[in-house]
Image: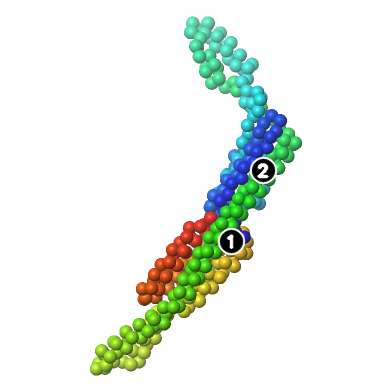
């Protein structure tokens, strides 16, 4: 079963004084492009988190975030009252000494001063981290499940489109005898016209062989059939096959294009157009396969 690179996971944990939400989002990317947003209180755990994310996700543009909502009156950033008071007294003293009016917007002025706000970055409580770590694991599982579900839908689409191309390939065979007969008739007519003209028979045979080979599509049909089967078997082999499937799609496209240029038959060219339409839908989605 293939997996999609698109995914989403979001799990929230309730702690005594805060609510912690872990969110993971992923979009398609050629390589693993990982970005993390972790509050400063958990920064010393960042390498552990990144290591687990690298193990879980092979490819994709992955955005990971931990978001903390504090409950009650306690907040991580508080006004540093002693420092604020010191600035207040200094400004009043300067005002009296210089004969300058004190500011009308005291708080606006004081809160701009250095160190008037303090952040308590305490060490992580291990019990609290155990809860958050478990939450991260659940979010990873949720996104993996999401990717698997998306992958199942992609796999169904691919199977349908590959089956469509295989069916169209069989339809082409119906017109090959007709096409061969038309070519034979055209050559016979031209020979009748050239009956009174002397020509090099050896050169003519060479040209005939070239002409027949030029319009023969048996090799392309065989290779295309093999590529279609290889695509299905690769897809069924499991996750992590996105790049290989992309290469197989390129090979399928090459054979379809060659058949189109060689067909020299209206009905066959119309079938090739339908093949290209189905293949284009595969191309659009195979970029999203892990």
174 relative to 70, above or below: below
Label 1 secondary element: loop
In the picture, the disc for residue 241 is: 1
Label 2 secondary element: helix
Residue occupying image coordinates x 49% and y 71%:
167
Q: Is residue 126 left or right of residue 120?
A: right
Residue projecting furthest to the left: 196
Could you say where residue 101 lies in the image, as x and y percent from the top left?
48, 8
Q: Earlier in the sequence, mark 2 or mark 1?
A: 2
118, 91: nearer the viewer: 118
225 relative to 23, above or below: below
Residue occupying image coordinates x 61% and y 64%:
236
Q: Quadrant of residue 256?
A: bottom left
In the picture, the disc for residue 262 is: none
In the picture, the quarter occupied by the N terminus is bottom right
In the picture, the disc for residue 136 is: 2
Could you say where residue 191 lies in the image, as x and y percent from the top left?
29, 89
Q: Is residue 192 left or right of residue 10?
A: left
153, 26: nearer the viewer: 153
Q: Quadrant of residue 217?
A: bottom left
288, 184: nearer the viewer: 184
Residue 10 appearing in the image: yes
């Amino acid at each position: 079963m293939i997996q999609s690179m698109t995914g989403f996971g979001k799990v929230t944990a309730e702690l005594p004084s805060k609510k912690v939400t872990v969110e993971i989002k992923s979009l398609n990317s050629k390589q693993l492009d990982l970005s993390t947003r972790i509050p400063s209180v958990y920064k010393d755990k960042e390498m552990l988190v990144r290591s687990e994310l690298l193990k879980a996700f092979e490819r994709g543009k992955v955005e990971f975030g931990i978001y903390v909502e504090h409950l009650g009156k306690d907040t991580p950033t508080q006004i540093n009252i002693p420092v604020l008071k010191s600035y207040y007294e200094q400004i009043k003293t300067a005002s009296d000494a210089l004969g300058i009016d004190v500011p009308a917007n005291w708080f606006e002025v004081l809160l701009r001063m250095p160190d008037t706000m303090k952040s308590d970055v305490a060490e992580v409580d291990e019990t609290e981290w155990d809860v958050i770590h478990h939450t991260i694991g659940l979010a990873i599982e949720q996104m993996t499940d999401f990717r698997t579900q998306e992958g199942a839908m992609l796999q169904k689409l691919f199977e349908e489109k590959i089956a469509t191309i295989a069916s169209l390939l069989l339809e082409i065979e119906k017109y090959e005898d007709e096409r061969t007969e038309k070519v034979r008739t055209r050559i016979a007519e031209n020979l009748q016209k050239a009956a009174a003209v002397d020509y090099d028979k050896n050169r003519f045979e060479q040209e005939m062989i070239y002409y027949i080979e030029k319009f023969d599509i048996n090799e392309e049909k065989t290779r295309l059939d093999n590529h279609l089967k290889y695509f299905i078997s690769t897809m069924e082999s499991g996750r992590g096959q996105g790049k290989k499937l992309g290469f197989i799609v390129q090979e399928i496209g090459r054979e379809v294009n060659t058949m189109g240029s060689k067909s020299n038959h209206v009905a066959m060219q119309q079938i090739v157009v339908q093949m290209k339409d189905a293949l284009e839908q595969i191309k659009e989605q195979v970029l999203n396969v892990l």
